[in-house]
Amino acid sequence: MEKSKDPLHGVTLKVIVEQLVEFYGFDTLAEFININCFKDNPSVKSSLTFLRKTDWARKKVEELYIRTLPKLKTL
């Protein structure tokens, strides 16, 4: 069976947000992606709620995750 080349294949939005928060913290995430769920009283739960409803913001988070993947793999 061929492995998917999509780096997001099988990765939930929750895992993406948790890994980005662990790696960068909410302050740095808010600098990279200017959305209130990372700036104003941030939590993984509130971020997930917003990102599931907001396609453009989710796309930005997914793009940042893909750019960050090589750094995450070295941890």
Image (cartoon, grey):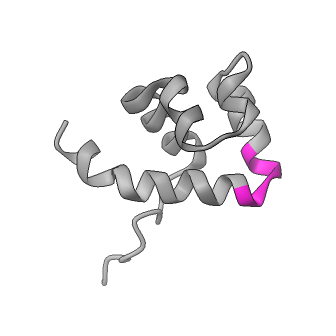
In this view of the protein, which residue sits in the foreground, 47 or 29? 29
Q: Is residue 4 magenta?
A: no
Depicted 66 relative to depicted 52: above or below: below
Residue 46: % across, % down: 74, 28
Residue 48: % across, % down: 70, 38
State which quarter of the image contains the C terminus: top left
Depicted 51 relative to depicted 43: above or below: below
State which quarter of the image contains the N terminus: bottom left
Q: Residue at x 76, y 49 (%)?
A: 52
Give the side of residue 58 with respect to residue 75, left or right.
right
Please state the extent of the stretch shown in magenta in the rendering: 51-56
Which residue extends farthest top?
A: 41
Which residue extends farthest right?
A: 53
Q: Residue at x 65, y 30 (%)?
A: 38
Q: Residue at x 59, y 48 (%)?
A: 13
Q: Main secondary structure of the magenta part?
A: helix
Q: Is residue 55 magenta?
A: yes
Which residue extends farthest left?
A: 74
Residue 12: % across, % down: 55, 50
Give the side of residue 2 with respect to residue 51, left or right.
left
